[in-house]
Amino acid sequence: MAEKLAEDDITTQLNAYDARKATNNDSTKVVLGFFVYFVLIILLFFLIFSQQHKISLIESINKNSTTPKRKIETISPFPEKK
């Protein structure tokens, strides 16, 4: 009887340990997930800001440019059908 109680006690402790371990792993995943999303959002804002900065820089250079405007020819990857 005493052995059965001791065995049940050990099993209960192991199950509690496993439950705590699983909870810690889950919370770690949640924290890492939020961190990854936070970093991605910061990168997204940085990319948007840098693109806007490039566009405004190009526009200001074009406005202040004294060289005559040239038409830029674009080459299409798809040839026109005749």
Image: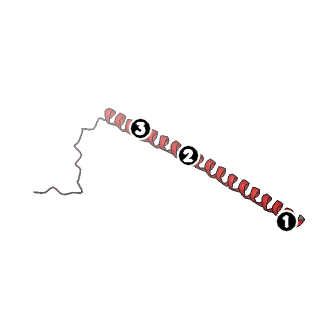
Residue 71 within the segment the image draws in magenta: yes
Front of the two marks 2 and 3: 2
Tell me the chief SS of the magenta region: loop
Residue 8 in percent (x, y) is at: 81, 62
- Assess disc 2: are there few (<14), some (14-19) or many (≥20) residues with their C-alpha within 10 Å of its C-alpha: few
In the rendered image of this protein, does residue 10 appear above or below residue 33? below
Q: Nearer the viewer, mark 1 or mark 2?
A: 1
> In terms of secondary structure, where does tag 3 sit?
helix
Residues at circles 3 and 1 in contact by the CB criterion of under 8 Å: no
Amino acid type at image mark 1: Lys
Residue 78: quadrant of the picture = bottom left
| Residue carrying label 3 | 52
Where is mark 2, residue-wise? 39
Quick one: label 1 or label 2, which is nearer the N terminus? Answer: 1
Q: Is residue 56 above or below residue 43?
A: above
- The answer to which of marks 3 and 1 sits earlier in the sequence is 1
Q: Amino acid at mark 3?
A: Gln
Spatial separation of the CA atoms under disc 2 and disc 3: 20 Å
Identity of the residue furthest to the front in this view? 1
Q: Looking at the picture, which amino acid does disc 2 mark?
A: Val
Residue linked to disc 1: 4
**Which residue is at the far left?**
82
